[in-house]
Amino acid sequence: MTERPAAAVRTDETTRAHGREWWRTAVVYQIYPRSFADSDGDGVGDLRGIIGRLDHLQALGVDVVWLSPIYSSPQDDNGYDISDYQDIDPTFGTLADLDELIEGLHARGMRLVMDLVVNHTSDEHPWFVASRSGKDSPKRDWYWWRPPRPGTVGGEPGAEPTNWHSFFSGSTWQWDEASGEYYLHLFSRKQPDLNWENPSVRHAVYDMMRWWVARGVDGFRMDVINLISKVVGPDGELTDGAVNPAAPAGARRFGDGSPQYTNGPRLEEFLAEMHREVLADGARDGQVLLTVGEMPGVTLELARSVTDPASRELDMVFTFEHVGIDHGPAGKWRLNPLHLPDLKANLAAWQEGLADAGWNSLYWNNHDQPRVVSRWGDDSPEHRVSSAKTLGTVLHMLRGTPYVYQGEELGMTNVGWAGIEDYRDIETLNYYRESVSGGASDGEVMAGIGPVSRDNARTPMQWDGSENAGFTTGTPWLSVNPSYMEINAADAAADPGSVFHHYRRLVELRHTLDVVVDGRFELLLPEHEQVFAYTRTAPGNQDAGDAGRSGGQTLLVVANWSGEPVTVTLPGQAAALTGELVLTTHPDGAPADGESVALAPWESRVYLA
């Protein structure tokens, strides 16, 4: 049984229909510059390293490159603490290097999306330096400053204005002895939150965005953008959050402040204003900019509202529900085994909820998530390739814009370090310190860190089997995953059966099949604990006789999400199972028998009927 090329290609009518919404047919590739390619031997990836690897991206076929932050930064949170929004950190290169990268991408038919980090800045940004200089500073209210709680002494435990727990452990408030007040930082103490209630802040951000658009940038990925609006009382007060009794002992004096700063009351007002001020006029050559908002805790209703084209706010959002589906009561550091029906139900809810208005972002991996082939696949030598392919297939055939994180197209795995000394991620290190100081053992804490630390995603890109995986001629800033001898881009490109070539085919299907872009989603076998199956049906079952159109076509995806063989019956899918097999992980798989199909471990198939 062998796969055959798809019969229908995207038509002129469909291309024109998508026009200004070009991102509906696109695939985005995320680059974490620090770990992608080092051109000068200092052990840190840089812009010239990316320029030297553009042919890899072109061979994969992706349409957009999203760069994690490359702005000037003290690097407390690997660039998400920005000290100058309009310059490049010398670690990564120069503005001239970025201009050359933009030119190289555009020449290859690709676009560039920049990370926009405007919930917070670095504490070394000139705005914050001025704000911190005194209570009478014109920029004092560009950030969130508050006095200690009444009856307490500033700087002492419990004196913080609220009990909110930081994303990076500890309090969200940092005492400033010189001015006698605390400033808010939802993340690191070196990442003070901007006060979006102040219109001067917002317009300074819009000015900066327009500057990047004029330079040739094609869009923005907006970091934690749904945290910019806080719930503020009539007198400017911020309120405490509930304490989680299941939290690690060291964190139980803190509360969950997220209801006070997630999806806040003015969020859509701010996003609509940003669109009017920057994005509506940002089109060049008839093409609109791509905007995607990272929104932890976003609801389906809010996502539908902000991505509805009529709202003129964002094109799509990153939801976190599916990547939190296996989190335990204490959060990400205590994972539960994945229950496949829960994941299917969640993805189906978002597919159906954004079917008529709005748009999905599709992702398993990014710079903050562990490698999915280790988390939900099987990274053993026997099943790594098949499970990586199947995970990719299930995701990419959904409705939405897929995001590929560097190394995902190779099937890169978690690194599996046993000691805290190997880690560099600030979130991981802070969690370790807080947990151990609260009485947890080293072994207990490391057992939670290993599967989920962000450093799993940040080990250097594995280009070939040479020293340091071809990433650098120096000492890498973060150790290379020892798997690079077996998993690398050079070997993958030379192997027609590799994960890389499977991903290349997934990209091609999105470019050539209308039904992949616009087809209606329907989940099959929702309670099956081993098989993930669904259909996509093209809209408008008319004019299907025209061979160049996809009217009436159905795409059937059936995937064995396990290391055991399985035979399933798919009621009503006999016709689909006799259609063209446009993609499979197992070319020698057994033919379907009526409505029944037998799948090998981690086998997936895509039929077109």
Image: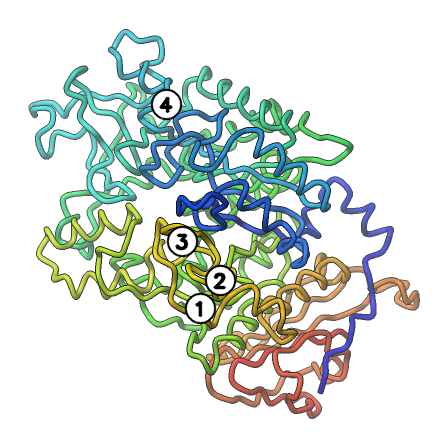
Mark 3 lies on a secondary structure that is helix
The reply to whether dot 1 and dot 2 touch (C-beta < 8 Å) is yes
| 245 sits to left or right of 192 | left
Residue at 17% x, 55% y is 248
N-terminal of the two: label 3 or label 2? 2
Distance between the Cα atoms at labels 4 and 2? 40 Å
Q: Which residue is mark 3?
A: 458
Q: Closest to the observer: 546 or 8?
A: 8
- Dot 2, how many residues are within 10 Å of its Cα: few (below 14), some (14-19), or many (20+)? some
SS for callout 1:
helix
The label nearer to you, 4 versus 1, is 4
Q: Picture coordinates of residue 596 (x, y %)?
A: 64, 89
- Above or below, comparing residue 360 to residue 525 in the picture: above
Mark 4 residue crowding within 10 angstroms, few (<14) / some (14–19) / many (20+) = many
Residue 402 sits in which quadrant?
bottom right
* Residue where numbered disc 4 is placed: 125
Q: Report the Cα–Cα distance between label 4 and label 3.
A: 25 Å
Reading the image, the residue beneath label 2 is: 346
Amino acid type at circle 1 is: Asp
Horizontal relation, residue 157 to residue 92: left or right: left
Q: In the rendered structure, which disc, 4 or 1, sits on the residue that comes first in sequence? A: 4
**Which quarter of the image is occupied by the C terminus?**
bottom right
Q: Which kind of residue does numbered mark 4 sit on?
A: His
Chain-order first, disc 3 or disc 1: 1
Q: Position of residue 334 (x, y in %)?
A: 27, 63
Q: CA distance from mark 1 to mark 2?
A: 6 Å
State the CA–CA distance, disc 4 to disc 1.
43 Å
Q: CA distance from mark 3 to mark 1?
A: 28 Å
Q: Residue furthest right?
A: 546
